[in-house]
Image: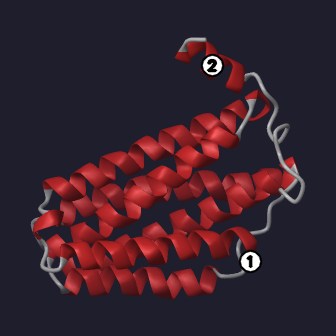
Amino acid sequence: MNEDAAQKGARSRVTGEDRLPGDPAPEELIARMIRVDHAGEYGARRIYDGQLAVLGRSASAPAIREMAEAEQAHLDAFDALLVERRVRPTALAPVWHVAGYALGAASALLGERAAMACTVAVEEVIEEHYAGQAEKLGEDEAELRQTLEEFGADEARHRETGLEHGAEQAPGYEALSAAVKRGTRLAIWLSERI
């Protein structure tokens, strides 16, 4: 079977039909996806707010503003999905409000390259996260899958923007990147559940 045929077969399935005992039901799976993605986009927006508070007049400010606008569009889409699908937002929103801003401001205080390193790390994790979510959706959720794929492509562009702005030249890049990735993965895990 060629890759296109395999992909087509995977896409013709219904969300959740391959779930194992103990896996969330399709409705809960979708609710978790929307909850965590809303939280993530909110957190991303707050990271950029923190970065702009410090770097608002820097050479990287226009790129940060552009990425923040894309995150706001994503957040608006998930705001609508919360209402449309009757999904409760994460109870951790107040934590992400403060933590996102703090991460953005702290990375920016380390310099423009460190702020971009933070962006690269977060966006890399989120791009993978969206791809994993899209893979779990069947044809019954084609519209949501398309949204996740589009947003994942935006996150990939943000990662590339960060790399173009010298993220890898930030002092302590590897350590900073690893810490931000761990924190992002933990925030994902918590926001899906709480």
Residue 56 shows in this picture? no
Q: Is residue 188 above or below residue 155?
A: below
Mark 2, Cα crowd under 10 Å, few <14 / some 14-19 / many 20+, is few
Q: Who is closer to the viewer here, 62 or 121?
A: 121
Quarter that holds the N terminus: top right
Q: Which of the 4 quarters of the picture holds residue 92?
A: bottom right
Where is residue 34 shown, x and y percent of the image?
69, 56
The residue that disc 2 covers is: 6
Residue sitting at x 25%, y 50%: 160
Residue sitting at x 71%, y 38%: 137
Q: CA distance from mark 2 to mark 1?
A: 35 Å
Q: Is residue 90 above or below residue 159?
A: below
The colour scheme is secondary structure
- Marks counted in the figure total 2
Mark 1, Cα crowd under 10 Å, few <14 / some 14-19 / many 20+, is some
Q: Secondary structure at mark 1?
A: loop
Label annotation for residue 82? none
The residue that disc 1 covers is: 194
Q: Is 101 situated left or right of 113 in this image?
A: right
Where is residue 147 shown, x and y percent of the image?
58, 40
